[in-house]
Image (cartoon, helix red, strand yellow):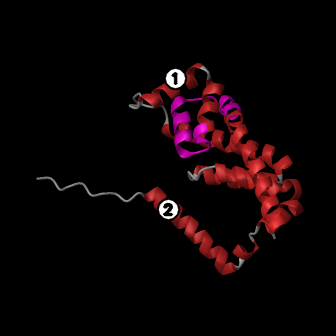
Amino acid sequence: MTEPARRRLPLRPLLLVAVVVGSIAVARATGVADSLTLVELQALVSNAGLAAIPVYWAVFLAAVALTVPGYPFVVLGVLVFGAPVGVPVALAGAGLSGTLVTAGYRAIGGNPTAAPRWRVVQRGLELVDRRPVLGIALLRSVLMISGPANLLLALAGVRPLHNLLGTVLGLVPATLLAAVAVDLLVAFFGGAA
């Protein structure tokens, strides 16, 4: 008789939770959490000037590489940079992080050995093969900058330029929606105070 297979703990999600909880604990213990208000972040970005943009992109990229969904970073970019600057900065950050992480997955994972089993995934890959920018834009408009979208595009072997253009194009509606919603919420809560 063989010994039953032991269940493995999902290491990556546990590591992500540990990093988030540890970061929050350190931020509270050091007092950094007290200064992470919207007003403080906007002042920090304003004081940093253009240097804040690559820092934002680096944090965005690192989070997406750790499979954190990217859309909260789009909203954060609109919030801290303001809509006129935040929309293009957030779109560029989304495009860069989605493209680089997908390329990284492709470099690490290589070529797929078999076709996907799910028909919806097969059809998505066929669309990306036939019309890459449109297919990527449709995929990103639904799944945004997420681990599943990045993995699917890595399996499709998309070109980085197609990925960048499709990602930015697919996220335009959601980013503009975030800009309008953020402005309305800030006006509402700012006026209520």
Instruction: Give the SS element for disc 1.
Output: helix
Per the picture, the main secondary structure of the magenta-coloured stretch is helix
In-image side of 18 versus 189 (left or right): left
Q: Which residues are magenta?
A: 142-166
Q: Is residue 62 visible?
A: yes
**Is 93 above or below relative to 14?**
above
Q: Residue at x 46, y 27 (%)?
A: 122
The three-letter code of the residue at mark 1 reads Glu
Residue 128, located in which quarter of the rendered image?
Answer: top right
For the C terminus, the quadrant is: bottom right
Instruction: Give the SS element for disc 2.
Output: helix
Residue that carries the numbered disc 1 in the rendered image: 126
Badge number at residue 15: 2
Q: Position of residue 27 (x, y in %)?
A: 66, 74
Report if residue 159 lies within the magenta region: yes
Answer few, some or many: residues within 10 Å of disc 2's Cα (few below 14, many 20 plus, some between 14 and 19): few
Q: Do the CB atoms of the residues marked 1 and 2 lie less than 8 Å apart?
A: no
Q: Position of residue 158 (x, y in %)?
A: 59, 29
Badge number at residue 32: none
Answer few, some or many: residues within 10 Å of disc 1's Cα (few below 14, many 20 plus, some between 14 and 19): some
Q: Is residue 44 visible?
A: no
Residue 5, located in which quarter of the rendered image?
Answer: bottom left
Report if residue 155 lies within the magenta region: yes
Q: Position of residue 107 (x, y in %)?
A: 55, 38
**Is 66 above or below relative to 151?**
below
